[in-house]
Amino acid sequence: MSESKCLGHPNPDIWFSDSIASIGWVERTEAKRICGTCAVSAQCLNFAVTRREEYGIFGGLTAPERNTPNAERRQYNHFHQ
């Protein structure tokens, strides 16, 4: 995904950490904000859901947000606001 906004970011840890708890609210918010302006955010989210990624922010959603009982609706609403 060469068009991704996270690619080459000076602090990739805000997306790809061992645990969502290891990054702070400010970093999480920044990662989500950047994802919200990314052209490949939907593909990124689909990638994470398909692979059942347990950590990190993909397509603007954390693992807990991706893995809720209403995850499909949340993903739809995330991209159709």
Image (cartoon, rainbow, N blue to C red):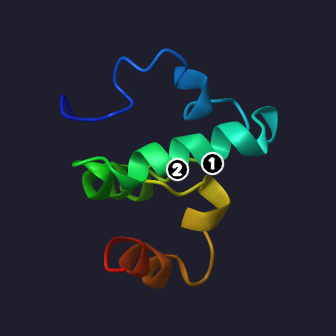
The picture places residue 80, in percent across and down from the top left corner, at: 31, 79
The quadrant of the rendering that contains the N terminus is top left
- Residue drawn where x is 45% and y is 85% of the image: 73
Asked whether the residues under the numbered discs 1 and 2 touch, taking CB atoms below 8 Å apart as contact, a structural biologist would say yes
The picture places residue 78, in percent across and down from the top left corner, at: 42, 72
Say above or below: 67 vs 62.
below
- The answer to which quarter of the image holds residue 67 is bottom right
Side (left or right) of 61 relative to 64 = left
Side (left or right) of 81 relative to 13 = left
Residue type of the residue flagged with mark 2: Lys
Residue that badge 1 annotates: 29
Which class describes the residues within 10 Å of circle 1: few (<14), some (14-19), or many (20+)?
few
- Residue drawn where x is 63% and y is 48% of the image: 29
Using the image as rendered, state which of residue 72 and residue 11 is in the foreground.
Answer: 11
Local secondary structure at mark 2: helix
What numbered label is drawn on residue 57?
none
- Residue drawn where x is 33% and y is 48% of the image: 44
The quadrant of the rendering that contains the C terminus is bottom left
* Residue 11 seen in render: yes
Using the image as rendered, state which of residue 34 and residue 47 is in the foreground.
Answer: 34
Count the marks: how many? 2
Residue that badge 2 annotates: 32
Residue type of the residue flagged with mark 1: Thr
The picture places residue 24, in percent across and down from the top left corner, at: 78, 38
